[in-house]
Each structure stands twice: as C-alpha cells, then as structure tokens.
Amino acid sequence: MGSTFQANFDFNDYHRIVFFTGAGISAESGIPTYRGKGGFWNQYDYEEYACQRAFDRDPEKVWEFHEQRRKFVSECEPAPGHRIITEIQHLKPATRVITQNIDGMHQRAGSVHLIELHGSLWRVRCPREGTISENFEIPLRTRRCTCGEYLRPDIVWFEDALDEEILNKAIATILKADLLITIGTSATVFPAAEIPLLALRRRIPSIEINLEETETSRLYTLSLRGSAGQNLRLLRDQSSLPIV
Ligand code: OAD
C-alpha cells in the first residue's frame, strides 16, 4: 500500500491535517523520552512520583520531582519538529495538534488549536475546588491553594482517567481530518493505539514518523523511519520520502 500511496501523495492536497505527537518530537529538544534507552521511566519509578497514591503519601516529594522537571524543560528550546508544525499551521490554518506531551513545547513554538491529552506541567489544579490555572513559576511560590488544599500538577498520572471531554474533542478532531501524522510515540498508552484506527475508519491517509517500528506501525498508510525534524522537513518540502 505504501508505494501506491507514495506515488500519488502530494502534501499540498491536504488541508485538515492532524498531528498527533509524543515524546519523540521533544527528544530533539533534549527532553528524554519515557521508554527505551535513557527513558524517564527506566530511571524513576512512577509509583514514587507520578500517581495519585504517591501524591497522597508524600505531596512534597512529588512536587519536588515535578518542579525539577519544570526547571529542566524551561531550559530547553522547541525542536525543529515543533517549529515545522507551527509553520504548517500558518500555511494551513485548519491544521490541528493533539499531543501526549506535557512539556508545553508546541505552545512555545507558536502552535495553536492544541489538545493536550495528558495535561500540562504548566498548569496546577486544586483537587478540592476543581480549579485549574496556568502557572510558570520556578519554583512555585506556594504549593497550596488559597483553600489550604495541596495543589497538584494538572497532569494525567498513571492510574488517572483521561479527561473524557478532552478525549472526545481529540476524537472529533481526527474524525474531521483529511490526513493524520503521528510523530514520536511508542503508542503504548491509551488512546495512542486507537488513533490510527480512527484514520482507517475514516479511510483517510495516515503517516507514522518514528525512529523505529512500533506496535501500531502496520496500521499506518506510510511509515517514515528517522527523526521527527528530518521527516517533517521532507514532508513540508515535498522531498522524496524514506518510506519503509
Ligand atoms: P515513549 O517514550 O513511550 O516513546 C517515544 C517514542 O519516540 C519511541 O517510539 C521512540 O522510538 C520515538 N522517538 C524517539 N526519538 C525520536 C525522534 N527524534 N524522532 C522521532 N521519533 C523518536 O513516549 P510516548 O509514547 O509519548 O505520560 O509516551 C506516552 C505517555 O507515557 C507520555 O505522555 C507519558 C508517559 O507515561 C505522561 O506524561 C502523563
């Protein structure tokens, strides 16, 4: 299927592109991915730092971890991949971005119409009042809400449910797309594996950009092996694509 599609493929034909991104796009900003060599969860135990149980047990320790992440990410810059997506969004304003990343890099690169499936390092939530606010302080001025409750990062931790409204918005966005481009995700966390199935259901073309094959590669019309930045540049410039 890949070669037929490649022969007919003209990026200029697509205007309602959905980019679905994971940690691989930010790897080129210097932010470690979660799995594989050097992966974040090989180094840190999520049960100690990234679940509600850990927070209930020791909120200061969990905050310490997240404050370090905020500081680290704030010292990184958006990668070429983030910037190319923004450029494409300027050229094709119906382009949408759905990300699993919590690092805020798409916004820093100037992307709009962004759906953050897993929340953001740059928002805090009061579990008692349900209020959510942006917060870019490093370190946080206070880890407590005015009501006295501990604020928590507005992140979908392990064992948390995804926000149903956000998930439905993401699905609706893909159902309106004419091209899906998935970048840098191992597709091991729900709903990443379902995303290419939505494209299949709609019979729209889909492209996976990843350094390596994933569990879901076979569900895509095209697989582009290599880095996010390099392949997005090729797509944008309509150069010959390294199809696998
Ligand atoms: P993973 O770390 O599971 O996977 C990263 C993927 O990016 C792998 O398939 C790599 O091959 C690929 N990759 C690495 N560098 C790349 C590059 N330069 N160009 C292209 N691809 C590259 O990250 P995710 O799939 O995003 O949850 O992880 C999903 C979720 O699991 C995350 O959102 C996170 C984590 O627990 C939260 O933070 C809440």
Image (cartoon, rainbow, N blue to C red):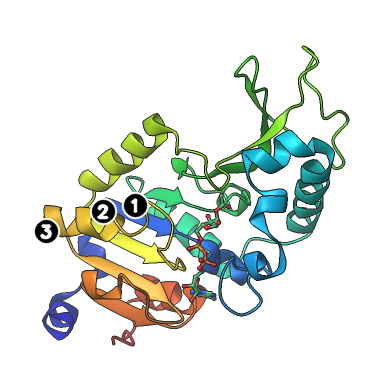
The correct choice, above or below, for 9 with respect to 12 in the image is below
Residue visible at 27% across and 47% down? 174
| Residue furthest out toward the top | 147
CA gap, disc 2 and disc 3: 16 Å
Q: Is mark 1 within 8 Å of ligand 1?
A: no
Circle nearer the N terminus (1, 2) = 2
What residue would you read off at disc 1? 92
Q: Amino acid at mark 1?
A: Lys
Residue at the spot of label 3: 203
Q: Earlier in the sequence, mark 1 or mark 3?
A: 1
Specify the quadrant of the image occupied by residue 237: bottom left
**From the Cβ of disc 3, is ligand 1 less than 8 Å away?**
no
Question: Up-down: is 74 above or below 207?
Answer: above
Instruction: Return the residue nearer the eye: 112 or 98.
Output: 98
Q: Is residue 35 above or below residue 113?
A: below
> Are the residues flagged by discs 1 and 2 in contact, CB closer than 8 Å?
yes
Q: Cβ(mark 2) to ligand 1 < 8 Å?
A: no
Above or below for 188 versus 101: below
Of the two numbered discs 2 and 3 in the rendering, the one whose residue sits closer to the viewer: 3
Q: Residue at position x 84%, y 39% from top?
A: 60
Alpha-carbon span between mark 1 and mark 2: 6 Å
Label 3: element kind? loop
Q: Secondary structure at mark 1?
A: loop
Q: Which residue is mark 2?
A: 15
